[in-house]
Image (cartoon, helix red, strand yellow):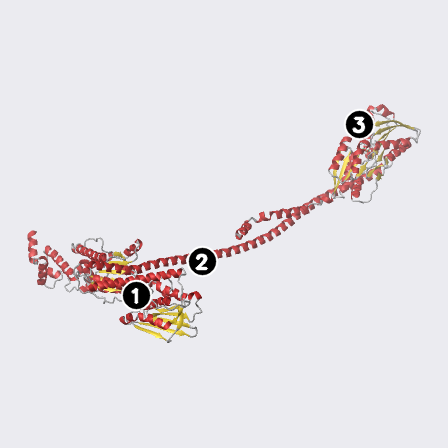
Amino acid sequence: MDTHIKLYKHQQPFLSVYSPFFILLFTLLCISCQPNQQDAILIGFSQCVDDDDWRQTMYFEMQKELAFYPEARLIYKNADASNAQQIEDIKSLRDEGVDILIVSPNEAQPITPIVEEVYASGIPVIVVDRKIASDKYTAYVGGDNYEIGNIAGAYAASLLPEGGKILEISGLPGSTPAQERHRGFTDALSRFNTLSLLDSINGQWEEHIARQETRRQLSRVKEADLIFAFNDMMARATHEVLDSAKVHSKPILFGIDGLFGPSLGIDMVSQGILDATFLYPTGGDKAIELAVNILKGKPFDKENILQTTVIDQSNVKIIKSQAEKIYDQQQDIVNQQRAIEEQLAVYQNQRTLLYVLISSLAAAIILGAFALYALREKLETNRELKSKNEEILKQQQQIMQLAQESEEANQAKFRFFTDISHEFRTPITLILTSIEDILESGSSHKQALQRDILLIKRNAARLLRLVSQLLDFRRIEHGKMEVKASPGDLIPFIREIFSAFEATASKRKIDYQLLCLESELPMWFDDSMLDKVFFNLLSNAFKFTPNGGKITLMVEKDKSTQKARVLIKDNGQGMSKNQMAHAFERFYQGEQNSSMGTGLGLSLSHELIHLHHGSIKVDSEPAKGTSFEVKLPLGDTHFKESERCHSSRNEHSTVLKTIYEDEDAFEEEESVSVGSPSGFSILVIEDNTDLRKFLLTKLQQHYQVWGTEDGDSGLVLAQKEVPDLIISDIMMPGTSGLQLARQLKSDLRTSHIPIILLTARDTTEQQVEGLQTGADAYIVKPFHTRYLLARVQQLLQSRNALQAHYKSGATESAPFPPPVDGISTIDQEFLDAFRSEVLQKLGDSELHVNDIAKAVGLSRVQLYRKVKALLEVSVNDYIRQLRLEKARALLCQQELSIAEVAYAVGFSSPAYFSTVFKNEYQQSPSEFVRDTTSAS
Ligand code: FRU
């Protein structure tokens, strides 16, 4: 589960996992690249009107000053000479959050309340040029308008020493410059009685209004000796009106502002249009400087009065040239500012680029670090996955191995039960056939009856032993087999078991010895268990030791380990290494288990010895013998209380002993009946002595018989004797029945021999497998003797039918009729080869059977038997028959004499030829020639 979660986590795209991080990083970088907005100074400027040069100059000066304060920013609003608009502008600047307000009011009264409000809200207010009707502002910047008016008045008086009439062209009456200039002017005039103020025309500061008003009041204007216009624009308008009215004696004309530039104040003075103008600085630069100082908390003056001066013919040249210089300097400054701004822009761009580059680099480094981290994580995950995979693979292999082991165990179990059933079927067959015998013959033959009953008894006992072994296993498997040990002496116990086999040993001439190295061996043991073990080990030894062999039973006390040691040693056929390794496995049936029976006895002994807290070991070598070593602990401490039995020891059962004595009792000589009524011979291959002998007894009444106990000797016997039929068991020591059948059927010498397989293997597949080997019949145990005999007879008869088929129609041109069912390819090929061999050598009177046998790859006997089996004639008879048939054909052609024909078909004398011919065809060759001629 953990792995899955981890996997999922690692499978997310890297950027999606870390995207919040990157967004944050990028934002931080962007913020760091931006100018610091929090430190910026926001200046609001409300201008009353801006369509004239003076106001433009003010704005220009402000911009010029702002260049020195990059942290300051100006928000500019123009009210277009409207009080209402200006009030709105101021509100809007306040709402935009300006840090300071600069205001140049249109008219004082209407604008005062809003300025006071802003001021009261804590925003500093700088009033420029025109004032408000209150002192609730932070600072004022502007010229002294009263003083200007006063100077103008005094200067007018100096120009009109004789006195004269003066006309005023005023600005907006509500604006303070208009009021103060008027006051200053009239105060000065009042000092001179000769001067009188003719009128005051309201030009509202605007050139076009002044033009309109002077034109309207031209007669009044014409009356004036001096006209004082409150700014240069209105003075210019007045001059133009007078000019266009062609007034010859023009009045003296004053203006205010004194701006530098074409048609502006200074220029008009130098051209003589104006007699004088009074410098009125705009204070734009000063207002900005003051604003910054106020916001930065630097000391400042509330009232900042700008200096004024008179510009007239006396100083206009100097002032103009100074103004030009100043203008040039200002232009330079502007150009430099532009250049600086451009540089600044380039710098800003480069800085931005640098930031972008640094950010990219930082991002690349971080990405790289994360990529490395991710790679490491991935490698780690991969490593984990790999080890998990390996683990899974290992588990898979283990499961597969377990499955294989379980499959093998199942197979072994299956084989085991098959074999057990085989073990059951043979005694059952013997019991059934014996009963059948008794029923058939009644009690007429006393000896035969006794033999049958003994056979039944013996095989019933064998069945009982098998069943008791199986039950013991069941008990062991279910933990029901319990040791019941009691104190006793092992020596007499062993001696008794030993003696049970003595009779058999002497009958089979086996050198059978008991070696007791102790006179007594007191110990605790379960006699019924050990009885089974030692009986089993001894029967095994007897089973696999040939007659005349040697079996030793030895008992001793191993003093070092305090154990009783029992050794059962034989010089029988022994076991292979593989058999030895699996000797005690219950279901192991490898290599046909020739030396291990069903494996039940040894496995049971092994289990019993272990229940008894002892050990058992096997040592064996093929063809040399086997020894079993049993070790049992002395004393009683190894037995649990429940395993001890304090009651007196029973005389141990002699059932097994009885069984063994009986089991090998059938010791009649395996006879080979010579000459039998049918003339056929049969070979019986069966490892169960009883069954083999029983079959031989039954068969020898009709056939010549041979018997043998295993496949290998069966094979040798079959090749040597070439019997007419073979009956073989399938499960046998050494070569199995199936292997035997396969080998016999592929061997030219024996391929024609019908084979009957006897077995306990009764499934259809098993029977098909049996027949596929080439076997002719398959008889399942238990079977009825009559059925077997009938099957034998039937197979021999069908062989006869084949013989008849082949013998008839055997002519030279078509030596054999086409093949029929029932003859194998190998036999068909043999017959073809044999026939052509004989025909080839027909003319050779010295032709010997040995030559033909050699040519077809068989011995003389084998050839005789094979030809006899297949064609039911002897080889010599067959050759003679072919010779005669060929002779008849030659005689018919009448090209050769009878003597020549006789030699041509291999007869050594014409006389002998005639005798043989007459015997065969009941007429002499000459009679045959005569009949043939007359017929044609
Ligand atoms: C410009 C102007 C100037 C004058 C000043 C008075 O608008 O009329 O010519 O000096 O305003 O406020």
Eye-nearest disc, 3 or 1: 1
Image coordinates of residue 509 in percent, x first then y, are 27, 72
In the rendered view, does 138 fall on the left or right side of 506? right
Three-letter amino acid code at the position of disc 3: Ile
Q: In which quarter of the view is residue 379 placed?
A: bottom right
Residue marked by disc 1 = 659
Q: Amino acid at mark 2?
A: Gln
Question: What percent of the width, then of the height, locates residue 456?
Answer: 26, 62
- Nearest the viewer among 682 and 633 is 633
Look at mark 3 in the image and give the residue it sits on: 209
In the image, residue 552 lies at what x, y percent? Answer: 33, 72
Mark 3–mark 1 contact, CB under 8 Å?
no
Mark 3 or 1, nearer chain start: 3
- Distance from Cα at disc 3 to Cα at disc 2: 113 Å
Q: Are marks 1 and 2 in contact (CB under 8 Å)?
A: no
Name the quadrant containing residue 573. Answer: bottom left
Could one spot residue 491 in this view of the protein?
yes
Q: Which mark is residue 398?
A: 2
